[in-house]
Image: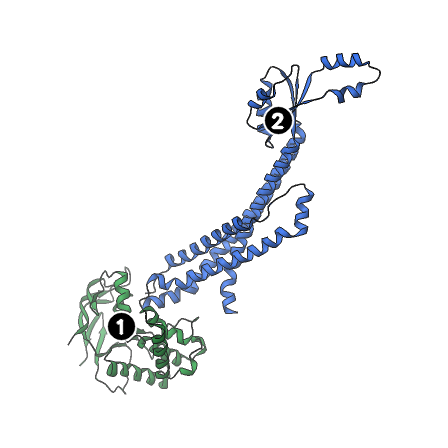
Amino acid sequence: MKSFKNHFSLVIALLGILFSLQVFFIVDRAVLAYKENLAKHYSLVLVSQKTLVSEEILKLDKNFSELLELSPDSVIKELNSGFSQKNIELLKLTLPKFYKLKLRIYPSPKELADISQKLLKNSSIGKVETFSKTHDTTYKLLLLFKTVITVFAATLLIVTILLIFKELRIWQFKHSERMSIMGLFGAPVWLRSAVLFRLAIVDALIATLLSFLLFSYISTNDLVLAQFESIGIEVTLFNTIEDSLIMLGVSMVVSILLATFIVLGHKEEV
Amino acid sequence: MDKVIIADNLSLAYSNDETIINKVKFSIDSGSFVFITGASGSGKSTLLKSLYGALKPKEGSLIVGGVELKGVSSSKLNFLRKHVGIVFQDYKLVKEWTIEKNIMLPLIINGYEKSVTQNQVDSLLKHVRLKHQAGKYPLELSGGEQQRVAMARALAHNPILILADEPTGNLDDYSSQLIWNLLEGANSQLKTTVIVVTHHIPESMNIDYKHFHIEYGSIHEVI
């Protein structure tokens, strides 16, 4: 029980940090996946009086991925009430050309305005339809979602850092007596602080292990996966090796820093 | 006879406060038993602190066990402390460690092997009559028992010098007598130099001792 109490508070604080960090990673990945998904389904429509050469248009911006000519058939079909085939062919010749321009990324409103301007500099292009109203709303929603989650994660991070500082004071109080006594019998600094560093390393390992178990469970939980599936994205919630190593690194650094602060802040009693 | 402590023109003070010990000169022979007395606030505990390097000399020279403590480096200080046993009025035991581990502390610091450490601790626990309490924690013991643990710890590594700051100040007669017997034993049998800061010298002392008295920042031998 005593040993459990020794570890509990720092493990909880470290868990808070690891949890907020991993949530931030998940949201970042989700937003990225969602943006890729949006980019897949998003395209601009270009209206031109002349036939556009795909290579020339694609050269204008590295984010242009594909230029497809839209068939005017669907437009003519709407008007096809009593036109002869000959008239239809004539109409096809007089109608401007419609193109669908696909992008590699889902652009921000500013990027979209820049793209639009670049395209309009080409004299053949008469109009660029960006569907900016729909686009802006979706983009802003995406940003809002990311901001809300980032603020949440940051708040959690701040609270846990405050908790760590509180823990630092408790540890300072708890360990300084033992360190002073050991010092009175000639223990070198490394030996005086060995218990502290051992405790810090063990707590970092426990916190990493608990986070690993928690996120391994979350990443295979059907309910969570269904939520992401419902918005049409596939996200790696927990990258077993990479994320575990990051977690281990962060918890080790935080707890070892905490122990170092205590050792550096320790003053021998006089 | 070898001198274990040589103080020359020694002045002591806490940070920028007024001088507590003022330009004193004394020496202590190796293997002697010394009492330092004085009124409360006279500076006897301050002097004792300076002997294990917790308070550095403000002026003058203080050599303990061959180590000059003025401007001493931490490694040299650690070296000295490895050969000194200290007993405090408030015991200064590590509360989260068992009695056994507390006694082991100087042996661990001095790098003794585990088997030697265990044998030494077992023998000391018998010596201070606490063998049955080995697995207990300090706060589970009475004051007298805690001080006996502190004494066992101070003796564990066969130090050249034992410094005791009012070791019986908080104890009943029975426990006090046990502590005096242990200190006398260390001095007479192991030839360890013992320096005790106290208000009263016990009447029951069975060995020769020296007596220094501190007054108004000066120290003089009482003959």
Q: Which residue is mark 2?
A: A66
Residue B96 position, x and y percent, is: 44, 70
Q: CA distance from mark 1 to mark 2?
A: 91 Å
Q: Looking at the image, which residue is at 49% across and 58% down?
A: A205
Amino acid identity at mark 1: Lys
Residue A130 position, x and y percent, is: 65, 26
| Direction from residue A245 to residue A107 in the image, left or right | right
Residue A134 position, x and y percent, is: 67, 31
Q: Tell me the chain of label 2.
A: A
Residue B218 position, x and y percent, is: 20, 71
Q: Is residue A106 above or below residue B70?
A: above
1 or 2: mark nearer the eye:
2
Asked if labels 2 and 1 touch by Cβ distance under 8 angstroms, the answer is no
Q: Quadrant of residue B220?
A: bottom left
Q: Which residue is mark 1?
A: B44
Local SS, label 1: helix
Q: Quadrant of residue B14?
A: bottom left
Q: Looking at the image, which residue is at 25% across and 83% down?
A: B189
The colour of chain A is blue
Give me the chain that's green. Answer: B
